[in-house]
């Protein structure tokens, strides 16, 4: 091979290596950028979705309790509260709605299907005798003067942690609609058994 030809081949090889190096740097930069976005995405998943006002939970020594309050959607898109979790307090957590039993002439409570949709600027009120959050199979006694933490799960995948005070309250003795018994508890107002009343206080966990 002649000397000029060898010089040409060497130059082409050098240019190819330089291009490959630039491509590798660009790919690495993109990967670093994607990695850097992950913490921000994780933070967005737990952002405040609704404003909670006047939240509180009913004190209970065992079995079940209810949580009330007002949830306001301050965003410009509708949101749907779809699930509840209270891992440190109860094994079962559900959203309950009020329905009319025409035969009995009274209202009853049952698990809501599809969750509570809250339109932009609207407020969903959870109250005794109305729609509410129900915690069942309590793992600890919910005592007045303490606080209870819940995770609100929304249909778009976002979640929000809230903490509400616990109060004594003699009301909220609602009844389930037929077929809505949960884990053998039946009505909200069922008296606790001697075994279930020996639960430790929640704040001791």
Image: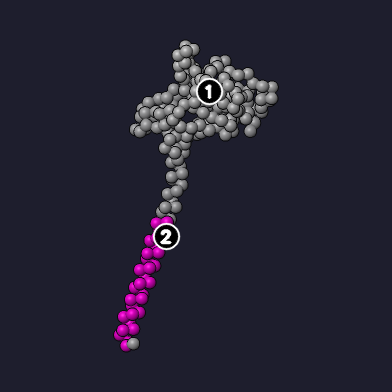
Residue 46 pos. (x, y %): 46, 38
Q: As rendered, which of 5 and 64 lies closer to the eye?
A: 64
Distance from Cα at disc 1 to Cα at disc 2: 58 Å
Q: Main secondary structure of the magenta part?
A: helix
Residue 24 pos. (x, y %): 40, 64
Which residue is located at x 43 percent, y 45 percent? 41
Q: As rendered, which of 21 and 192 lies closer to the eye?
A: 192
Q: As rendered, which of 14 and 93 lies closer to the eye?
A: 93
Extreme bottom residue here? 2
Q: Residues within 10 Å of mark 2 (few under 14, many from 20)?
A: few
**Which comes before the other along the chain, label 1 or label 2?**
2
Query: Can you see residue 29?
Result: yes
Q: How is the image coloured?
A: one colour
Decide if residue 194 is on the left or right side of residue 153.
Answer: right
Q: Magenta segment, which residues? A: 2-31
Q: Residue 26, located in which quarter of the rendered image?
A: bottom left
Instruction: Look at the numbered disc 1 and give the secondary structure of its residue.
Output: loop
Q: Residues within 10 Å of mark 1 (few under 14, many from 20)?
A: few
Residue 77 pos. (x, y %): 35, 33
Decide if residue 73 is on the left or right side of residue 90.
Answer: left
Could you say which disc has been placed on residue 179 in the image? 1
Instruction: Look at the numbered disc 2 and give the secondary structure of its residue.
Output: helix
Which residue is located at x 69 percent, y 22 percent? 194
Query: Can you see residue 147?
Result: no
Q: Residue 66, located in which quarter of the rendered image?
A: top right
């Amino acid at each position: 091979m002649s000397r000029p030809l060898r010089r040409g081949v060497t130059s082409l090889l050098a240019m190819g290596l330089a291009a490959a190096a630039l491509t590798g740097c660009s790919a690495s930069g993109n990967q670093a950028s994607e990695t850097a976005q992950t913490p921000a995405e994780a933070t967005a998943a737990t952002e405040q979705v609704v404003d909670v006002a006047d939240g509180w939970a009913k004190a209970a020594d065992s079995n079940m309790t209810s949580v009330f309050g007002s949830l306001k959607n301050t965003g410009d898109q509708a949101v749907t509260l779809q699930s509840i979790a209270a891992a440190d307090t109860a094994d079962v957590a559900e959203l309950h709605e009020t329905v009319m039993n025409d035969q009995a002439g009274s209202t009853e409570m049952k698990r809501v299907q599809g969750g509570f949709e809250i339109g932009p600027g609207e407020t969903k009120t959870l109250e005794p005798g109305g729609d509410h959050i129900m915690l069942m199979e309590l793992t600890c006694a919910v005592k007045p003067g303490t606080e209870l933490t819940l995770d609100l799960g929304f249909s778009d995948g976002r979640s929000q942690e809230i903490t509400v005070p616990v109060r004594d309250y003699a009301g909220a003795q609602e009844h389930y609609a037929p077929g809505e018994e949960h884990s053998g508890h039946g009505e909200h107002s069922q008296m606790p058994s001697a075994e279930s009343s020996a639960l430790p206080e929640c704040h001791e966990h």
